[in-house]
Image (cartoon, helix red, strand yellow):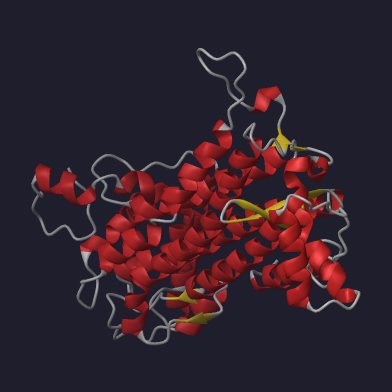
Amino acid sequence: MTKQLWNKGFEPDKMIERFTVGNDRELDLRLARYDVLGSIAHIKMLCKIGLLTEEELSRLVPALEDILHSIESGEFTIEDGVEDVHSQVEFILTERLGDIGKKIHSGRSRNDQVLVDLKLFFRDELKRISEAVNRLFTRLQSLSEEHRDKLMPGYTHLQVAMPSSFGLWFGAYAESLTDDMQMVVAAYNIANQNPLGSAAGYGSSFPLDREMTTELLGFSNPHYNVVAAQMSRGKTERAVAAAIASVASTLGHLAMDVCMWMCNNFGFVSFPDELTTGSSIMPHKKNPDVFEIMRGKCNRLQSLPNELTILTANLPLGYNRDLQLMKDIVFPATDELVDCLDMADFMLSHIRIKENILDDPRYDYIFTVEDVNRMVVEGTPFRDAYKKVGMAVQEKRYKPTREVHHTHLGSIGNPANERIADKMTLLLKKMGK
C-alpha cells in the first residue's frame, strides 16, 4: 500500500505515481538529515506555543535524533510505497510513538518543509563548493609565486602579443575565482533565509514563532513575507546555478588553456605520463583527457541557469509540481563541480613548466612593445618610437633587447598575490569561515 501524507482513502494509479514521483526518492536521501533537523526545530517551536507538551517533546526529539543517526550511518532508506523523505520520517515516528508522531506536521505544509530542507542543503553545498574553490585558489596562488619570474608569451587573437609570465597566468585564474566566490556568497545569502512557517505559501492560523525556528536552524533571517518565502523556490536554485556556472566558466577556461599549452606546437606545460592518456595507434601520444573532460563538464554546467530559467519561466504564483524537477538538475551539479575543482587542484599539483620559452626566436616580436616603451622613457614621442620599431619589423631588421620591466600593480613584476588573497579571505568570512 502506498504511504502518502495526503492519502484520502484511495490508491493512486500506479502509472500516475511513477510519472509524478520519478527518481525523487533517490534524490530525497540527500535531504534526509535536513528534514530531521527542520522537524526538530519545528517541534521545539510547537512546544513553546503550546501545540506539544513537554512530555511529547521529550519523546519526539530523541526519536528524531535516532533517525538522524541512522541517516548519518547510511542505514536510512525510503521504503517502497513511501512517496518521499518527509513521509518516511513521519511514518517512522508514527510507527514508534503512535499518535504523537502525527503531531509534528501541525502548522507546516510539505511546501515549506521541502523549502527548509532545500535551503539547509544548498547552504551546506555552497560551503562545500567554497571550500573546493579555496583549495584550488590556494594552489594557483602558490604556483603563481613559485613561477612568477618565468616568462611566457601573451596572446591576443591567438597571435603572439606581449610578454606574460606563469606567475600572471596562475594568478589570473586565482583572482578570477574571487569573482566567482562573489556569486557563491550571493547564492549563500539567498539560501540562508528561513521559509519555515510559510506553510503552503499563505501562512497559518497557529501562532507560529518563526523567529525561534530561524535561530534554531542558524538562518540569518526569515523570509518575512510568507508568499515571498514560497516564491523563493526556484529563485534559490537559480542563484545556486548562477554561482555554479560562474565557477565552471573560470575552470573551463583554465582547462582549455592547459589543453592548448600541452599541445606540441606550444609545449609550455606537461604532466607525468601517468596523468595523461595515450592513443590506440599512435605510440607517442600523451593526451590531456582529464582537462578535456573537465572542459566539457564545465561547459555543461554553464547551461544550468538557462535550464532552470526555462523550467520556471511561466509558472503561476504558488507551488507547482514542476519545481520538483529542479532537484534532478541542481543536485548532481554540485557534486560535479566539486569533483572538477578537486581534480584541477590534483592535476596542477603535478604540473611541469617549461623554462626559457621566450629565448626561442619565434617570440622575438613579443618584445616590440617593450622596446617602444623604452624609447619613450628615453624621450622619443610614442608615435615616433612605434613607427621606428614597426619599420624595423617590416624590413626584417628588428633585434629585441629581451628586457622586461613591469613594476606596476598587477603586472609581471608585481602580481599582487597578497592583495588577491585578502579578497578571498574576506569572501570566505562571509560564508562563515
Q: In terms of depth relative to the viewer, which is nearer, 182 or 210?
A: 182
- Decide which of 345, 262 is in the foreground and name it: 262
Residue 140: % across, % down: 74, 52
Instruction: Find the residue positioned furthest to the right.
Output: 378
Q: Residue at x 57, y 72 (%)?
A: 218
Q: Residue at x 64, y 56 (%)?
A: 133
Q: Quadrant of the C terminus?
A: bottom right
Residue 403 falls left or right of residue 295: right
Q: Is residue 179 above or below residue 9?
A: below
Nearer to me, 328 or 300 = 300
The relative height of residue 53 versus residue 136 in the rendered view (above or below) is below
Quadrant of res 406: bottom right
Query: Is any part of residue 99 visible from this angle?
Result: no
Q: Quadrant of residue 430?
A: bottom right
Give the left or right position of residue 196, taking residue 180 as reference. Answer: left
Q: Residue 45 placed where, x, y %?
A: 46, 77
| Residue 115 picture location, percent across and down | 38, 67
**Where's the N terminus, which quadrant?**
top left
Residue shown at the point (79%, 56%) measured from the top left: 367
Q: Position of residue 260 (x, y in %)?
A: 60, 41
Q: How many marks?
A: 0
Question: What residue sits 31% from the left and 83% below the top?
Answer: 227
Q: Is residue 258 left or right of residue 269?
A: left
Horizontal relation, residue 153 to residue 107: left or right:
right
Camera-nearest residue between 347 and 166: 166
| Residue 162 visible in the snapshot | yes
